[in-house]
Image (cartoon, coloured by chain):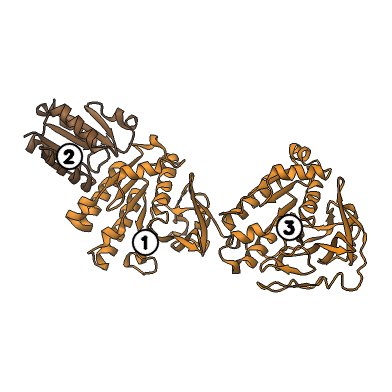
Chain colours: A orange, B brown
Amino acid sequence: MTASTNDSVIPIERLRSAVPGLDQILGGGLFRTGVYIIQGLPGCGKTILANQICYGHVAEGGAALYVTLLAESHSRMIQHLSTLTFFDVHAFPDKLAYISAFHDLESGGLKGLMGVLRREMRTRKVGVLVLDGLVAASEGASDLDLKKFVHELQSIAALQDCTVLLLTSGNIHRMAAEHTMVDGLIEVEDKLFDARSERSIQIRKFRGAGPLRGKHSMRIDNDGISVFPRIESVYRSAASETMRDEVTTSGIASLDALLAVKGIPMASSTVVIGSTGTGKTTMGLQFLHASTAEEPGLHLSFFEGPDRLRTKARSLGLGIEALEASGAVELMWQSPGEALLDEIADRLLAAVARRNVRRLVIDGLSGFLESAVYQERLNRFFSCLVNELRSRRVTVLMTLETRDVVSSVVAMPWGVSGIVDNLFFLRFVHDEGQVERLLTIIKMRDTDYRAGLRRIHIDAQGMHIAGTYRADGDVIPSAQPVASPEGPAPSPST
Amino acid sequence: MKTILVVDDELGSAEVLSLILEEEGYQAFCAVNGQLALVQARDVVPDLVIVDYMMPLMNGAEFARALRADPQFAHTKIILNSGLPELAIRDQFEGYDAFLRKPFKVETLLTLVRQFIGR
């Protein structure tokens, strides 16, 4: 009788990369004993990526070897790496070494190079080996020679329990012979968008598992490389419903009174749109001020820092500091400058998870819009972000500034209209020599509300609805939302 | 003429250093790892060795230990160099005469060479 062999299949262990976000897009990390190509043009981050994996492996108790062919000198590489936080001088010489094998390649070809790699892998007992300069190795070699080289490397890697990274700056769009042989192909890129550049990483091939496909943003800073998976690839569950039966306060009692359910449906998303000075940030602070220990609040601001917000809140009679001290509120500031779209989303979702946030203010949606290098992606990005927040039972209030200071036109940027459950419009009007602030509830999904134009007052007690505004003739033109040049108008309120 | 052996797996570095030493009036030889360097040392019997630390096959410390174990090289001057700080490798081998952290200035090296073996 023949025993079944199904039970004897041993899954291949993963190698944790120590590169934040990379293991997530790989579905758990590189497979141990795999041979992977890391490919990209000079300057895109291959060397740092490979080194970070080496130092990460050493930090976990392993040993690594970095072999160069025709690459930057070891001393210069160490000088550059020593400025990064993952650099650890104590890794040398037992756990990490840099050696050149160019002489062996030059004198013995691929066979000579293989001899060095095999010998060093065995004697140093390394778990990670990097070969930097595959282009130099492949010059003059036939496709068959290269395939044999990779095949032999795979055999040795399996026997020595070593994961091998081959670095090459070869043409990323050319299908090379070695690509067909390796266990995975990781492509890194640094692309220019007008004056701004953004790095990305893409897993083009990965045997044995399904990685998160497509390009993911990548940042290099003092901590080395961080990868930020595209949130659409991470959060793929079906759109969650708002919690229709549960309601939370807007933070403004007189506004709640205008809504049929006497508040905002929990886990819904509200956009407050208006020109500068109309009261968007004030409305956000009032919403935040209703946070409690049971309903913790988070305020993400792109333009006003925490100190300015605290001052503003004080002038409205809102004690944000006390809520911060009790842990009910956190103020988070994000520079709108060079941030990556997915990096902001990652930071935001991490902050939401950390404190189990239930009330979220995003003050300045344009901060997201300015961070997007692919504008056509915004619709998917926002719907995924809002859906994820909804599934975490977070009620969101977002502000969006219009360009016209005195206008009745609501122009929704492309990407925002699809995420709106509720839409409030704040504006200035001139009326008989006076400037008034008005609020219009344009849309409330699945709930009724009292339509019309409402006067609002902002004073030392905050924002209040101060009665109905009656327009004479053409003072207030149509308040219907219209399409912005970039995209369609939101669907009509229900 | 004084003889110097330059040992470095980064062959370009070793070759450039050798050329500079020859311009200064020394006879210089190169080797790309410790094993080859030992063979060459027995052949050319250098007055001074400039050796990199991290190399394949036999690193600089292993080479220097093996060299010192041979009585004919007991007093040969050894300048160990590396991109790593000295404290990271000192406990591997202490018998060197000087340590240079890469990248170093050629004048610093030449001063040491002159100090050890003269012109």
Q: On the image, numbered disc 2 is attached to which residue?
A: B6
| Front residue of this view, candidates B119 and B8 | B119
Q: Residue A32 — which label?
A: none
How packed mark 2 is, by other alpha carbons closer than 10 Å (few <14, some 14-19, many 20 or more), is many
Q: On the image, numbered disc 1 is attached to which residue?
A: A182
Which residue type does callout 3 highlight?
Met
Secondary structure beneath label 3: strand
Can residue A125 be seen in the rendering of this structure? no
Which residue type does callout 2 highlight?
Val
Marks 3 and 1, the one that precedes in the sequence: 1
Q: On the image, numbered disc 3 is attached to which residue?
A: A398
Q: Is residue A36 above or below residue A123?
A: below
Residue at 50% over, 61% down: A195
Can residue A164 be seen in the rendering of this structure? yes
Residue at 80% over, 46% down: A289
Q: Are marks 2 and 3 in contact (CB under 8 Å)?
A: no
Residue A367, picture quadrant: bottom right
Residue A4, picture quadrant: bottom left
User: From the image, which quarter does the N terminus of chain B lie in?
Assistant: top left
How packed mark 3 is, by other alpha carbons closer than 10 Å (few <14, some 14-19, many 20 or more), is many
Disc 3 versus disc 1: distance between alpha carbons?
47 Å
| Front residue of this view, candidates A19 and A194 | A194
The answer as to whether the residues below labels 2 and 3 share one chain is no
Where residue A15 sits in the image (x, y, percent)?
45, 49
Does A328 sit left or right of A21 as displayed? right
Disc 2 versus disc 3: distance between alpha carbons?
67 Å
Which residue type does callout 1 highlight?
Val
Q: Chain of mark 2?
A: B
Q: Chain of mark 1?
A: A
Where residue A44 sits in the image (x, y, percent)?
42, 56
